[in-house]
Amino acid sequence: MQTTQSEVSADTIDLALGHPSPALLPLELLREASARRLRQEDRSCLQYGYEQGDLRFRAQLARFLSWGYAAEVSPEELFISGGVSQALDLICTLFTHPGDRVLVEEPSYFLALRIFTDHGLRIGGLATDRHGLVPEALRESLRKTRPAMLYTVPTHHNPAGTTLPADRRERILELCREHGVLLVADEVYHLLTFAGAPPPPLGSFAGSGGVLSLGSFSKILAPGLRLGWIQGARPLLRRLATCGFLDSGGGLAPFTSAVVGGLLERGTQETHLRKLRGIYGSRARTLVAGCSKLLGVAEEPPAGGFFFWGRLPGIADTEALLPEARAAGVTFVPGSRFSTLGGQREFLRLSFSYYEEPQLEEGVARLAEAARRFRPPGKGP
Ligand SMILES: Cc1ncc(COP(=O)(O)O)c(C=O)c1O
């Protein structure tokens, strides 16, 4: 059976895929780290785990995040999750009721929208611009409705690639606090910044309450590990750690976190992350240079993350281009998939995480060929 997360066809260049390249999955590092952990006599990682996550692992993770975020993170404000998706699902279970409203960016990460729908939540889209969520749109919405939470991807947004400036982060936080709205920040791409440093993650404000910041090893190590974290104030984490699910099954991923803890301890994760930043940054530039040359796109390469979001001159609805693109041996995600308001039709999302540069160039050439056949005469670049 093919699923949303694992569909890869051999003769198509699938620029929809948000997976790391197989060659970037660190098999050797994990083989060594698992063997090192299994040679120890300590069997605690094979036992039911402590609900909030193993303390030693949380200390290792806190040190890694303090380095990555350039801001102090304490083990007490970390809860170990099975990745961002699992964390979101648990947050919905514990902090929302069916029929509640959740506010999201327009456009937003479409698979998070599916999790909200599973929980019977009503989704409200908020305006964004090239700097991300517009605080005024949030203020206006909060004047009229009382949502259970705001879900945002503040840094290297999926799909839009935007990063919220520091002043907007503070304003959004202030508005959520004023209205008693839980702010759920999906910061899964924060550490994947190609150059420089983004503004402090919303996790940095978690200590004073009202914020849950979600992170994951999916993009910086391997998605198959299903390992991540939630950063938040203690009362919020206590609610997570005392739920029935953990009461019955214990803390999440005790074995995986013991293995990954070894990589954090030895600085291997840091080295691997630096390598990924270089590779993905270069791929992003190659992809966008091709799009600019062959397709006439005007957008700049993204500064981090996995995706390029852009418009193709002369194409008003990228969904309509898909059959032609498939026939040319390339696919992408049309912008409409990310919209809660039936918009974003002129955009498309291209991923540069899965393919190496020559294949990305070939994918763009195929897309340009498809666009050339599809466009009305005289509407091309
Ligand atoms: C914004 C965003 N959040 C969450 C995820 C999934 O994260 P995880 O593998 O930790 O569940 C993705 C993966 O594409 C993503 O783009």
Image: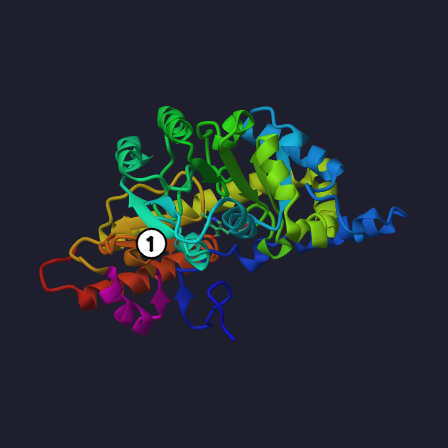
**Residue at the extreme right:** 41
Left or right for 255, reference 293:
right
Is 375 magenta? The answer is: no
Q: Residue at x 30, y 46 (%)?
A: 125
Residue sitting nearer the eye, 73 or 374: 73
Please provide percent x and percent y for residue 305: 45, 44
Residue range of the region highlighted in magenta in the rendering: 318-332
Query: In x, y percent, where is residue 358?
Result: 43, 57
Q: Which residue is depicted at the point 66% across and 43% down?
A: 242
- SS assignment at label 1: helix
The x, y position of residue 63, in whole percent, is 66, 30
The chief SS type of the magenta part is helix
Ligand 1 lies under 8 Å from the Cβ of mark 1 = no
The way the protein has been coloured in the rendering is rainbow
- The residue sitting at the left extreme is 378
Mark 1 crowd level (few <14, some 14–19, many ≥20, 10 Å Cα): many
Is 63 situated left or right of 231 in this image? Answer: right
Near-viewer residue (326 or 147): 147
Q: Is residue 201 above or below residue 41?
A: above
**Residue 230 in view, yes or no:** yes
State the residue position of label 1: 338
On the question of residue 29 being in view, the answer is: no
Q: Amino acid at mark 1?
A: Phe
Q: Residue at x 36, y 52 (%)?
A: 122
Closest to the observer: 281 or 70? 70
Rendered location of residue 101, percent (x, y) = 37, 47
The answer to whether residue 285 is above or below residue 168 is below
